[in-house]
Amino acid sequence: GEARVLLSVHHVLVDGWSNTAIHIEAEKLLGVYSAASALANSSVLTFPQGAVSAPPPPFADFIRWLRSRKPSASLAFWKEHLAVMPPVPSGLAFLGEAATSGRQSSWTPSVARFAEMSSAVPAAGLTKAAKLMGVTLGSLCASALSLVLMEYTMDGCVTIGCTVSGRPPSMAAVDEIVGPFINTIPLAFQAPDAGTSLVRWMRAQQARFADALEHSHLPLPEISKRASCRELFRVLYVF
């Protein structure tokens, strides 16, 4: 007869990235079960290809990797990264503060700042535009969001909370581990100089984002202790 298997996982135990590894292991298990069920009609137990293979690395490998790291290096990185933050983080709350601070509450975007991007995106699409600029799509969208917030808030620096996988790129086979790696990190963006092209600025943000990912395993409460303001961000970006 027909059998159905329901997989239920809690986000406190695993993140969305882990679903692929879980599904692969579940398919292996079902393959072994099917092979065993067919044994009644055959004297030889034949497993499907890939059913018998090494399991994914345990989460304990990540714990050992964390213990091998020097927390001081990551703490120093975030202290330097957040040093450019304004005293009050930018975000949606500025709309209510505009009347008392003398700022305009309406958005009056700088057409020149977005001219290069707007001319490339409609023709090529976001994915192709990111490729032409030499950045990832996620980095392009985050950088574009920061430019919009800079126009809204009239601040030369904004900080955005970015939800990331939390899987350090330098750790071997980290993509295969099942566990709760997901984290949110604060990314600080500074407005491009007048003489800096948008493409060059985008690539610089991409490099900063890559550096931040190497330290994205540090819990957000620990990162916040290195900031000069009490709130790291008011806008959350999930790609």
Image (tube, helix red, strand yellow):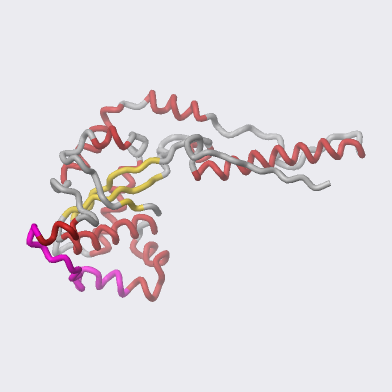
Q: Indicate the position of residue 150 as horizontal and vertical percent values.
A: 20, 60
Q: Is residue 202 left or right of residue 1?
A: left
Which residue is more in the foreground, 26 or 129? 26
Residue at 39%, 66% (x, y): give it. Answer: 126
Asked whether residue 71 is drawn in magenta, I would say no
Q: Is residue 157 visible?
A: yes
Quarter holding residue 120 = bottom left
Q: Is residue 44 left or right of residue 125?
A: right
Q: Is residue 169 visible?
A: no
Which residue is more in the foreground, 146 or 64? 146
Total count of labels: 0
Q: Indicate the position of residue 221 as horizontal and vertical percent values.
A: 29, 34
Vertical position of residue 100 compared to residue 212: above or below: below
Q: Which quadrant of the figure contains the C terminus?
A: bottom left
Residue at 39%, 62% (x, y): give it. Answer: 131
Asked whether residue 109 is drawn in magenta, I would say yes
Quarter holding residue 133 = bottom left
Q: Is residue 171 left or right of residue 146?
A: right
Which residue is more in the foreground, 198 or 158? 158
Q: Indicate the position of residue 227 as horizontal and vertical percent values.
A: 19, 38
Vertical position of residue 33 compared to residue 149: above or below: above
Residue at 84%, 38% (x, y): give it. Answer: 37
Which stretch did the figure color magenta?
100-119
Q: Indicate the position of residue 224 as horizontal and vertical percent values.
A: 24, 37
